[in-house]
Amino acid sequence: MNSLKTIEIYNYKSIKHLELNLNRNLNIIVGSNNSGKSNIISAIFESLDVKNLDTAFQSISRLENFERKLPKTILSTSNKQIITLNNKNKHSIEYEDNNTNTIYNESAKEAVNKRIKIAKVDNNTSLDQSIIEIVQFFDDLDNNEVAILLSNINRDLLAISKDYYSLLIFNNELYVADCYGDTAPINEKSNGVKKLIIMSYYINKYNVKNNKMPDIILFDEPEVHLHIEAQRYLYKKIQEVFKNSQIIISTHSTAFINETDINNILLIERDVLQGTYIDYNKKDKVKLLEINQIMGINLLDTLRININSTVVMVEGKTDKIVHQYIYHRLFPKKSLTFIETEGADKISDFITVYKEVFPNPPLGVLDYDKKGLEMAKKIQNNFNSDYNNRIILNNNKSIKESNLDEKIEDEYSIQLEDLFEKEFIIECISELLIEDEISDTLKEDLESYQNFKSFENVIKKKNIMKKDSKYHINKYSLNLLIIRKLKELDEPNFQKTTSKFQEIYITLNKKNNT
C-alpha cells in the first residue's frame, strides 16, 4: 500500500507553513486545544480526496492580512510520488511520478484515487450524517454481508460499551436494543450511544468484501463520548484492523498516548508568529513532559508531592509504606516524601523526568543486592555526582562511596526486611506463615534465618518439590503485618527494632541539607 512520507502545508487555517514527517504505520497527533490538530487531519484529507476542483479548499483556507489565499499542499509518498496541489491556481494538481511531471485538471480526482485510497473518521461530521452513511452502506450489501457486518458491530459494541447495546435492522431502519429491554430507533438514542455505534461501524466496514482497505485512515479525536476502557479497546482495535494501513490520529486520550511509543507521537504547538508547528529538535523527555501537561497529567498531582518537599525514591509499594511510617515516627518534623518507582529498573527513568521538574536531585534508597548494584551503576553512568551522592544503598553507603563491581551473594544481600532487628522480622514472618498453614519443616528453616533473600530461596526450592504449594511470601501482606506490629511497640522497643532505618534516615537528612 502507498503511504505518505512527508506533507508540507502552506496557508491553511492555523497553518502558515508546516512540514510533517510521518511514520509508515502509526502517527498520533497531540496538542493543546486550538493548536491545529484537526486542521492537519483536514488538510491531508482534502488534499487526497478532491471532489470538485472548482470549490476545493475555498471554504477552508485561512484569512491572512484580510486577504483570502488558497492553501498549497505538497505530499511525498512511499512510492516516490510528489503531489502538489494549488501550486499555480485553484484548478491545478501537479504530480511528479518517477521524475515525470504531469498536470491533471478535470481528471485530478481519478488521478489521485489511482495512487492513494484515503478514508476519514471525522468528528466534524454530525452524528446524524454518519448514521445516514451507515444506512446507505447497509443498503448496498447483500443479506449475507449485512448479517456479517451486524454481527461484527455488535461484538465490538459489547466490548466498548459499559452497558449492553445491540444494533438491529427492521424495514431498512436502524434500531438499538439495550440491556433494559428497550428497543428504539437509533435517532432517539443519546449522542454517546450513536458514537459507540459509529465507531463500531468504522472499524468493521472494511472487512466487508469488495470494500478495499484504505492506504491511509484518518481519525479526528475518535475517543469523544467513549469511557476510558472503551478508548483502550478502540485504540487496540484500530491498530488490529488497519495494520496494513497508515494510521493518523489526532487525540486527547491518555489511553491512546500511554500505549504509544514516543517516536509515533507528533507534538503540535502553535504561536502567533509561526502558527501551527512541530519542534523536531525537542528531546524525548521534554516532549513527554509537555504531552503530560497537555493530557492534564501533572507530575506533582500524580505523585502527590509538593514541589518544596524532598523526594526519596524507593523500589516498590511495600518499601514506600514501611519507610513512610518509620521515618515520620522517628522524625515527625522532617519533610521527606517517599515515592515508589515500581522497581529498581525504573529508577533511572524516574530521575530523567523528575529532574526536569524539580530544582534539586532526588534522594533514594536501593536494596544492597545484585539488582540494586546494577541500577546504581546505571545511575552513576547516566547522571552527575550530585545524584550519585544522594542515592544510597541499604548498607548506608551512597552510590559514590560503593564498589559497584562487587559480587553480592544472596546470603549477604540487604533488603528492606533485613534492616529490622532479626528477632522482630522472624516473629513477623512466622505469624504470616502460620496464617498460611505452612509446615513445621519450613518453620525450622526460619529458625536458622540468615537474611530475607536466603529464606526466599528456601521457599522457592520447596515450591519446586510441591507443585501446588502455598509456600510463598506475599511481601505486601508481610509489610502490612510489620507496620501493625510496629504500632504495637512502645517507643524504646520501636527505636531498638528500627535502629538501622534510623541510621539510613540520618544519612538522608544530612544529604538533604547539603
Image (tube, rainbow, N blue to C red):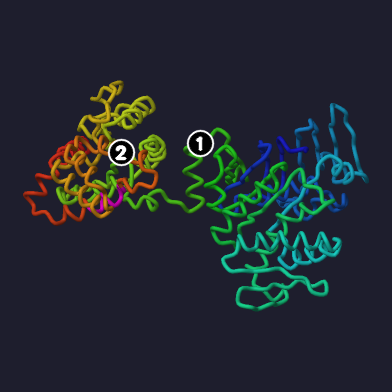
Residue 505 location (% of width, % of height) = 18, 40
Residue nearest the viewer, comparing 49 with 56: 49
State whether residue 172 appears in this view.
yes
Please count the marks in the image.
Answer: 2
Q: Label 2, on which residue?
A: 362
Residue at image coords 80%, 62%: 146
Q: Quadrant of the C terminus?
A: top left
Q: Are marks 2 and 1 in contact (CB under 8 Å)?
A: no
Q: Residues within 10 Å of mark 2 (few under 14, many from 20)?
A: some
Going from the N terminus, do you reach mark 2 or mark 1 first?
1
Q: Nearer the viewer, residue 512 or 34?
A: 512
Quadrant in the picture for residue 452? top left
As drawn, which residue projects farthest toward the left?
Answer: 492
Q: Is residue 70 visible?
A: no
Q: Position of residue 205 (x, y in %)?
A: 76, 56
Residue shown at 22% from the left, 38% from the top: 512
- Residue occupying image coordinates x 23% and y 25%: 401
Q: Which residue is mark 1?
A: 284
| Amino acid type assigned to the residue bearing label 1 in the image | Asp
CA distance for labels 2 and 1: 21 Å
Amino acid under disc 2 = Pro
| Crowding at mark 1 (Cα within 10 Å: few <14, some 14-19, many 20+) | few
Q: Is residue 50 left or right of residue 120?
A: right
Tell which of 366 and 313 is nearer to you: 366
Residues shaded magenta = 474-481
